[in-house]
Each structure stands twice: as structure tokens, then as C-alpha cells.
Amino acid sequence: MGEGSKRLGELRGRREALKRELAGVDEMRPGALVGRYRKCGKPSCHCAQAESGGHGPSWSLTRVVGGKTITKIIPAAAVGETSAQIAEHRRFRELTRELVEVSEKICDAKLAAAPKAQAVKKGGSKKPSTPRSRPRSKRW
């Protein structure tokens, strides 16, 4: 087994492993989860104190869709699940990026291993070309 075919076999093995990992991808969603603290504006509230961070956090998921930023409020009870979904989306993107890279390397290895095509000499036709349209009338 040559070095090129051994390398090709390794690449194909990695491609199959990536496909199996992709088959195991769970629920996912793109975006960034942000916790925000705010002050309510009441002078007697604890958030009005200088050392207070404010009320919160209130959680929101932000992402860009069609060039516009979309924000969705996430309940505190769903923050853990949403974080896992975002992490799964990142893993999916990384796996697909690597799958494309490995596939490209496989294509390049196959091209390098293929026999070289012989150059074909181009020759002109024996008969002269004919015009495709009728000549214009010379009456004017």
C-alpha cells in the first residue's frame, strides 16, 4: 500500500467518523445568550444604591436573521437548556467545517493519484466557416 493510498484511507476514515458525530447532533440554535441587569428607577428600591447591580439578570437570546438583529427573551428556567443548544450549534458548525476540509483533501488526493491526462492537440476544421446569418440588404 503506497503512502498516497494510506493517506487517502486515513482521510476517508476521518470523514466517516465526522459523519457519525454529525448524526449524533442534538437540538441546537444559533445566537448568544446575554444576562442583563437593570435599574427600575424607584428611589426607594435596592437597585438605586450605588453598589447594587440592579434587578436581574433577565436573559435574552440574540442573533442576526437576514441582516437584522433578533432578540428573544429566555425564561430563567430555560437558561441551562438554551446554553446547551447554543453549544451544540457551535459543535455542529465546527464538525461541518472539518468535514468540508477533509472532503477537499480527499478530492485533492484523488486528483494527485489519478493518471495524468494527455494533452489533446486542437486543430481547426478543414472547411471554411460560413456566416450564421444572411447578409444585410445593401439597398439604402
Image: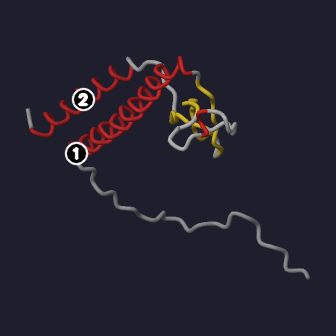
State the residue at coordinates (39%, 18%): 23
State the residue at coordinates (70%, 36%): 42
Mark 1 and mark 2 residues within 8 Å of each other at the beta carbon:
no
Q: Position of residue 43 (x, y in %)?
A: 68, 39
Report which residue position mark 1 lands on: 115
Viewer-nearest residue: 109 or 56: 56
Q: Secondary structure at mark 1?
A: loop
Q: Earlier in the sequence, mark 1 or mark 2?
A: 2
**Residue 26 higher or lower than 121, as above or below:** above
- Tell me which amino acid carries mark 2: Arg
Which numbered tag is attached to residue 14? 2
**Residue 97 higher or lower than 88, as above or below:** below
**In front: mark 1 or mark 2?**
2
Please identify the quadrant where the N terminus is shown: top left
Q: Position of residue 51 (x, y in %)?
A: 50, 41
Residue at the front extreme, as displayed? 44
- Tell me which amino acid carries mark 1: Pro
Whole-number angstrom distance, CA of label 1 to CA of label 2 = 25 Å
Residue at the bottom extreme, as displayed? 140
Q: Horizontal placement of 63 versus 137: left or right?
A: left
Please identify the quadrant where the C terminus is shown: bottom right
Q: Position of residue 12 (x, y in %)?
A: 25, 29
Viewer-nearest residue: 84 or 128: 84
Mark 1 surroundings: few (<14), some (14-19) or many (≥20) residues within 10 A: few
**Residue 82 higher or lower than 105, as above or below:** above
Q: Horizontal placement of 9 versus 50: left or right?
A: left
Q: Position of residue 120 (x, y in %)?
A: 33, 57
Viewer-nearest residue: 27 or 32: 32
